[in-house]
Amino acid sequence: MTTHYKSVNHMEVIQMDDEWLALDTSTYSVTRLNESGGFCLSMLSEPRNSEDMASELENRYGISAEDAKRDVKVFLTHLLQIGLVNYA
Amino acid sequence: MYKLQFKVSEHVLTVRTDSNRIMAFFQSPDWSRLRINHTDTDLTVYIELGYGKPFVDFNVESKCSEKGITFCRTDYKIEIDPALREADIYVFDEFALKHALMNLYSTFIVHNQWGLLVHSSCVAQHDRAFLFTGHSGAGKSTAARLSDPRPILSDEATIIKIDSGEARVFDSPFRSEIITPGLEESRKLAGIHLLEQSPRNNRKRLKKADGMLQMMDKIFYWPHHAGDTHNTFVLCRKLADAVPIYNLEFKKESSFWEEIS
């Protein structure tokens, strides 16, 4: 069975110049993301699996499938750890 | 029962108390220059002495329910009605009262999406205001003192209204040690400076995201409700959009103003 992920509801995301900030309104903590991190997070307003995310990242930024998979894995690991993304 | 009224920025604050000591607190120059008599009020506060124990630390516990918001520290307790129009403050002493009033006013302006109370000093130069902030001991009060004879708008907590792409600073009664005549008119905030003492003066502008992140922990805000936390976030973003934020390495002398204006 494929694992799906979704961003938590208690989160606000804004873009400032080429960076993204994600605020956890339950803890008043802010996480800074680069552009591709912001793009990954924007995908998770609906449940998504890591393969779909990597595919979209690959198409958007013209990177290799291997790099896209690695970037998505790093992103999900970090955001699951800090509680901004949950298993859907 | 005594009744006093003050104009704090654009808000009418009505204070009620039975205590002569509390009355004496509001006789200080910082507060007495804001005295008014008005029929309407934005926020009514009842204040009582005799609560809790002496100050231990800055840790504040908050609770929000349909009955309102409660903030508790060892030396004060604040109970605010859900509409944020009335509050009861119970304090151990005058130090606790000052902090409780800052907590209440910050909560009030954030809830109404009016602006922010920022841990900082702020100085007026002609029709503009310049804010100085940083970690504890960075030199906020020192920068304000070294700015003499420029008028000081705040030396501890700066009141900033954020509206229509502009930030304006009002005279703050939430003072630490510098007593000045105050200014009746607000000033447009033209720059925010994150202080770092240094052998030389140097000013460098930050990217907006960096500036916003730096400001988030300079706000007097105790999380109590997701909606108000959202408001804080939005207001910080508007502030970072409206006002340039700089790192300012400064020598402890007035020459740092050459980097600013």
Image: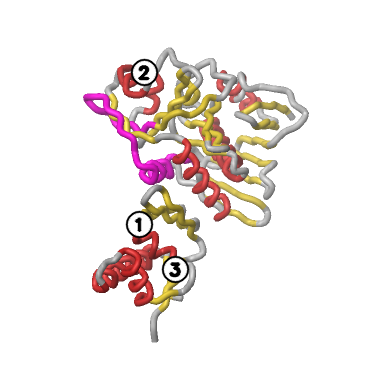
Q: Earlier in the sequence, mark 3 or mark 1?
A: 1
- Point out the stretch of residues depicted in magenta: B193-220
Mark 3 → mark 2, Cα distance in angstroms: 50 Å
Q: Residue furthest right?
A: B39
Quadrant occupied by the C terminus of chain B: top left
- Residue B251 at what x, y percent from top left? 27, 23
Q: Nearer the viewer, residue A5 or A61?
A: A61
Queried whether the magenta region covers residue B24, the answer comes back as no
Chain letter for mark 2: B
The amino acid type of the residue labelled 1 equals: Glu
- Residue B21 at what x, y percent from top left? 61, 26
Chain letter for mark 1: A
User: According to the image, label 2 marks what residue?
Assistant: B146
Quadrant occupied by the N terminus of chain B: top right
| Crowd band around label 3 with a 10 angstrom C-alpha radius: few (<14), some (14–19), many (20+) | some
Residues at marks 3 and 2 touching, judged by CB atoms closer than 8 Å: no
Element at label 3:
loop
| Crowd band around label 1 with a 10 angstrom C-alpha radius: few (<14), some (14–19), many (20+) | some
Q: Is residue B72 left or right of residue A62?
A: right
